[in-house]
Amino acid sequence: MTKKERYQIVLDYFEKNIPNAQTELQYTNPFQLLVAVILSAQCTDVRVNQTTPAIFKKYPNVQALAKATFDELFPLVKSISYPNNKTKHLIGMANMLIEKFGAEVPMTVNELVQLPGVGRKTANVITSVIDEQPNMAVDTHVFRVSARLGLTTKATTPLAAEKQLIQYIPKHLIHKAHHWLILHGRYTCLARNPKCSSCGLTAVCLYYQKQAKLNAKAANN
């Protein structure tokens, strides 16, 4: 099976089974999504969605958040992982948006990564979700699933995985493929106990084939 054929099988499967995949973070505008994605680093979307309503109520826009003090914002963020840093990042992000970007969330990766708390992954999420740009955010789910399915080969870093994925996924599908891989990793291809019995991609999954060989070898011993 060629790499191109492997990608086609995987993309066709997701297109059929998860046609309307989208982020599970709850937001109503780019500013809210940016706040949510900053908070989501090493934290579940469920926890973020439990936390953001109170933040958005008290700080409904960039201007309001920019005026927040650490002591005012921290209690609303403290249930999130790394609350000290994220509180500082949110306030710094809001101030930079006003000072440098006219209080608007920029829509290029190069501009977004200038903001406190925003790395390449976060910038890729914002631009792909809001503007459907062909940017692939590689989190732990995407990294794991793409390797197991053989979509990436010897990719030792998120950036290496990103480059391989965007090389083979058609541009118009990249923003959707990001969510497909995340959702598959979150609900089916789990890190410790993947639900291979309910997965429709075992025919092309390198991880599954490897496990099948190990199980067969164990059974013969």
Image (cartoon, rainbow, N blue to C red):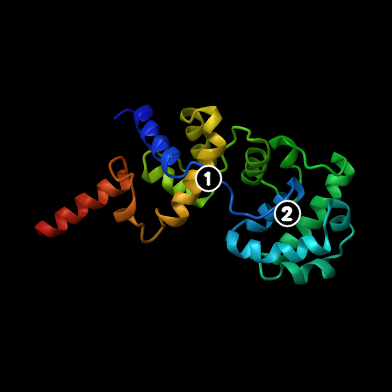
Name the kind of residue labelled 2 in the image.
Val
Name the kind of residue labelled 1 in the image.
Ala
Q: Residue under circle 2?
A: 35
Question: Badge 1: how crowded within 10 Å, few (<14), some, or many (20+)?
Answer: some
Question: For the residues marked 2 and 1, what is the alpha-carbon distance in whole angstroms?
Answer: 21 Å
Q: Position of residue 21 (x, y in %)?
A: 53, 45
At horizontal 33% and vertical 44% (from top left) the residue drawn is 201
Q: Position of residue 15 (x, y in %)?
A: 45, 38
Is residue 43 in view from this perspective? no
Q: Residue under circle 1?
A: 21
Is residue 69 in view from this perspective? yes
In this view, 92 is above or below 132: below
In the rendered image, which quarter is residue 124 located in?
Answer: top right
- Tag shown at residue 144: none
- The residue closer to the viewer here, 158 or 22, is 22
In this view, 81 is above or below 146: below
